[in-house]
Image (spheres, grey):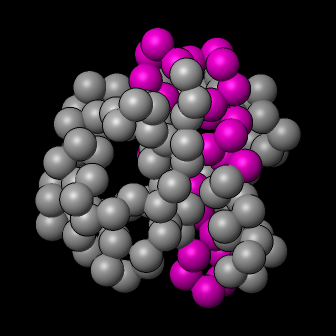
Amino acid sequence: MAIDIRPARSDDTSAVLAFWREVAAPTTTDDAEGVAALLARDPGALLVAASSGQIVGTVIAAWDGWRGSVYRIAVAPEHRREGLGLRLLDEAEQRLARLGARRMQAIVVGTDESAVGFWRASDWEGQTSQLRFTRG
């Protein structure tokens, strides 16, 4: 079964939110307004992996002009360990490089063992010397 990776469209919003509710840790911006704002501000940042019309993976590859950020890599359980996460990461990196990003960072939920394992198995370097502070 083929899996295509493409930029999300506004009509994907409901399916993306439902997918995230099932497979990803919730965030404060997991709502239609948050997704709409992302699509309006940075078209192409939200990439979806689709198989037979169903979303089976996502990644956000955001560029702020200074650094590329990767968020929300999520893969449906039935498609894990098939290389889809790495394909999504590769697409994200390519997008960010095309936009001019020379530095990239990933925001990873540190208590999510599966997510941490994925990133440790990638060729990205974990940084323990930096802290992240958030609001919202």
Q: Is residue 14 shown above or below 2?
A: below
Q: Is residue 5 shown above or below 54?
A: below
Question: Which quadrant holds residue 33?
Answer: bottom left
Q: Is residue 93 left or right of residue 79?
A: right
- Find the residue positioned furthest to the bottom: 65
Q: Quadrant of the N terminus?
A: top right
Q: How many marks?
A: 0
130 and 107: which is toward the camera: 107
Residue 114 visible in this rendered orientation of the protein? no
Residue 43 horizontal/vertical position (percent): 43, 76
Q: Is residue 19 left or right of residue 120?
A: left
Is 31 inside the magenta-drawn segment? no
Residue 84 horizontal/vertical position (percent): 62, 31
Q: Is residue 125 shown above or below 1?
A: below
Residue 83 horizontal/vertical position (percent): 69, 26
Is 74 inside the magenta-drawn segment? yes
At horizontal 62% and vertical 33% (from top left) the residue drawn is 85
- Find the residue positioned furthest to the right: 123
At horizontal 67% and vertical 54% (from top left) the residue drawn is 91
Q: Is residue 12 left or right of residue 127?
A: left
Residue 68 horizontal/vertical position (percent): 64, 69
Q: Is residue 46 left or right of residue 85?
A: left
Q: Tell me the magenta residue range.
A: 63-90
